[in-house]
Image (cartoon, rainbow, N blue to C red):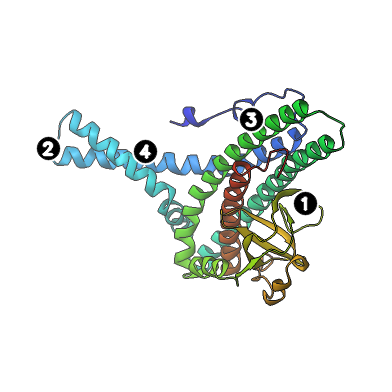
Amino acid sequence: MLAGCVTTREGRIGADDGRDPCRAQLVALDSTGNFFGEDILRGAAIGAVGGAIVGGLAAAAAGGRGGNIAAGAAIGGVAGGVIGGTAGYYQARQRQATDQASLNLAIANDLAAENAGLDRTWIAYTQLMDCRFGTAQRIRQDYRAGRINRPQAEAMMVDTRNRATADLSLARTINNQITERGAQFDVAIESVAPGVKDQVLTGARVSRAVPVQTRAPVALKLRPDPGSPEVAQISARERVTLRPAPNGFAQVETVSGIRGFAPAGSFPEARTLGAPPPEPNANAGDIRSLAATNIARRDNFTQSIGNAERLVQAGGFELAT
């Protein structure tokens, strides 16, 4: 099982063909996935081995023979893999701890390391997406300026879109690893800091939303940053929903679910939005803050990948947005 999960970098992201302007950012994102893959596999493997033994013994105790015992071991292996991926981490920490304080400290240290890994992945991912959508924006600019003809621009855009699609597949793979690993932490978090997950996710979903109809075309950016690339264009009189965002921006969501950011001044109604919900305090060392930060980062990464996929499908890599 483990041998089947091991891949090389070239197998994951392909060989360097010398034509990818975002190769460095792609390698950086791929490298961050190593942090999340190793321990997940180890935990699942330990759980599966233990489950297979228990399943086989249970079948034998019930009078099973041959195939029945093998089937029991297989079923136990599946169940054990689930346990190893969720309760296994917390149970292992419990066995190692001498008291509740040492258990909390161990989990807090693990969460701090996990959060640092999530930060590295987030930075690498945003830099890669900035590069891809920025490349698409430059292709449009070069085409409009007559520096390249339409067939050249279309071929370049197809190549960029295909590479972005492969990037998002890699990001999904890493996110699946993060999610599996997060299930381990969720069990521990609920035990030592009950209610944190519900509190974080509820707070992230209830930010004030204002439906508006645009008065003029508005360009949407990938992130709430003036230097972020443009990813979509909102037409005049288009109905959208605004939510508060940092840095003087508003988050804009179309009826099709596309999300981007535009200066709040583009919408008079944005004055009623108020401030965005505060992020969990990543610098606080207590376990509740570390847990909240961990949950928020995981949720943000998942949401961002989904939005980028919608942007790719909705024309984010067409000559006209």
Q: Earlier in the sequence, mark 1 or mark 4?
A: 4
10 Å neighbourhood of mark 2: few (<14), some, or many (≥20)? few
Tell me the residue that label 1 is attached to: 228
- Say whether residue 218 is left or right of residue 169: right
The CA distance from mark 4 to mark 3 is 31 Å
Q: Position of residue 311 (x, y in %)?
A: 63, 46
Tell which tag, 2 or 3, sits nearer the viewer. Answer: 3
The CA distance from mark 4 to mark 2 is 22 Å
Above or below: residue 230 compared with residue 102: above
The CA distance from mark 3 to mark 1 is 25 Å
Asked if the residue under mark 3 is in contact with the one under mark 4, i.e. CB atoms within 8 Å, the reply is no
The quarter of the image holding the C terminus is top right
Tell which tag, 2 or 1, sits nearer the viewer. Answer: 1
In the rendered structure, find residue 49 and report the number of the disc placed on it. Answer: 4
Q: Earlier in the sequence, mark 3 or mark 1?
A: 3
10 Å neighbourhood of mark 3: few (<14), some, or many (≥20)? some
